Image (cartoon, rainbow, N blue to C red):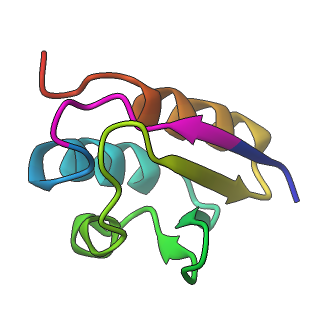
Amino acid sequence: MPSKTAIVGSAIGLHARPATIIAEAAAEYDDEITLAVEGQDPVDAGSSLLIMTLGAEKGAVVTVESDNAEAVEVIAALVEKDLDAE
């Protein structure tokens, strides 16, 4: 299964706004996409609430996994972006 690690780029981490942007992008794919931080179970990237439960702060390492390599790249790029700056 394709996976990629990404460093959280949003200034306040994956809180409400970045989590919603990521979940909306993940919902555009029919494939399951998960996000995980070390030591925790993966969560569904299509759920902003579940993304927020990761507690991923700026600089945290997040692993993105999916059978869809394109989805992995798109979601990883969003995790790395400062989505609070947009």
Quadrant position of the N terminus in the picture? bottom right
Residue drawn at (63%, 54%) of the image: 63
Instruction: Give left or right: position of 24 versus 2.
Output: left
Q: In the rendered image, is residue 52 in sight? A: yes
Residue lying furthest bottom in this view? Answer: 41
Is residue 85 magenta-colored?
Answer: no
Residue drawn at (22%, 73%) of the image: 49
Magenta segment, prevailing SS (helix, strand or loop): loop
> From the viewer's perspective, is residue 50 above or below residue 2?
below
The residue segment tinted magenta is: 5-12
Where does the image place residue 48, in percent across and percent down from the top left? 25, 64
Residue drawn at (70%, 57%) of the image: 65
Residue 80's quadrant in the figure?
top left
Q: Nearer the viewer, residue 73 or 68?
A: 73
Instruction: Give left or right: position of 76 versus 2.
Output: left
Where does the image place residue 61, in percent across and percent down from the top left? 55, 47
